[in-house]
Amino acid sequence: MASATWREDLKALLDEMDAWAQARGWRLIREAPLTREEVDALPHMLTGFEYELPTPYREEAFVIPDSYREFLMLHREVRLEYQPDTEEWETYRPFHVWAPTMASLTAAWTPAGTTVDDREITTTDLISFADAYMGVEASRWCFYTRTTPKDGELPVYFEDNDYEALAGHYVDDGTWLDENDPMMFGFESFEHWFRALCKVLRREDVDPEDVRQVGNSIKK
């Protein structure tokens, strides 16, 4: 369950990130909030996925985590932007909590027929909500729904399709693609993940322009 002070802490964290961004000549974009009804509708939205899935999506398994709900009811999307050599603002992908749309929430899903070592795999239990940019295209942070929510929260896993979707399962026996526990690179809740992300970016020994260093520092 999200702590009683989480919403106020979240506001303070975002203000701190805003000040940090301005000091660098960057900017923090905070989009409008979702309503409670819009947040409640998110699990039902995903039943309209257009591709065949290797394992069915179960909307009842996607219980909106309490700390994520507080975030969405404050801002539907938060991202850092910077200006490289051009005048166009660009999204700084290691700090981009996505707007919850069909495309963003299902970005981690692999369609039916995706195989590793000639065995079909599934990532239907992952609900993506943020970039985990490591210098490659297909990495993100996801809620893991093949578990019972604990204190109103779902664990957060790092998922990367460029390394054969290591947070996924084999369809035939349900074993992880990687023998390591995904929690090695995960967090027990959205709140813990977001606090860690903000802390890492503001550390003096981390180069925010080195996305691999930032990403590796966020992972446990």
Image: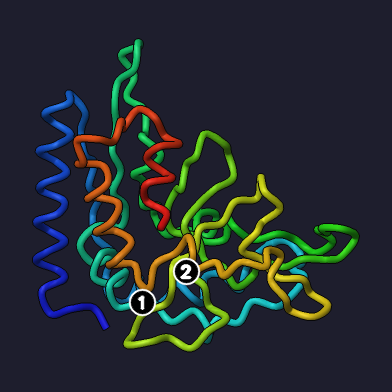
Of 35 and 80, the residue lying toward us: 80
Q: Residue at x 35, y 27 (%)?
A: 209
Disc 1 residue type (three-letter): Pro
Q: Are marks 1 and 2 in contact (CB under 8 Å)?
A: yes
Residue 201 percent coordinates (x, y): 26, 42
Residue 48 percent coordinates (x, y): 62, 69
Badge 2: how crowded within 10 Å, few (<14), some, or many (20+)?
Answer: many
Give me the C-alpha separation between circle 1 and circle 2. Answer: 9 Å
24 shown above or below 137: above
> Which residue in the structure is indicated by mark 1?
65
Of 7 and 162, the residue lying toward us: 162
Q: Secondary structure at mark 2?
A: strand
94 shown above or below 66: above
Instruction: State which quadrant residue 210 falls in.
Output: top left
Q: Residue at x 27, y 83 (%)?
A: 1
Say which label, 1 or 2, has the lower sequence index. 1
Give the position of the C terminus as an image quadrant. bottom left
User: What colour-coding does the image apply?
Assistant: rainbow
> Which residue in the structure is indicated by mark 2?
143
- Left or right: 162 with respect to 53? left
Q: Residue at x 61, y 66 (%)?
A: 180
111 shown above or below 58: above
Residue furthest right in the image:
118
Residue 87 percent coordinates (x, y): 30, 14
Q: Residue at x 30, y 30 (%)?
A: 207
Disc 2 residue type (three-letter): Phe
Residue 170 percent coordinates (x, y): 77, 71
Q: Which mark is residue 35?
A: none
Q: Secondary structure at mark 1?
A: loop
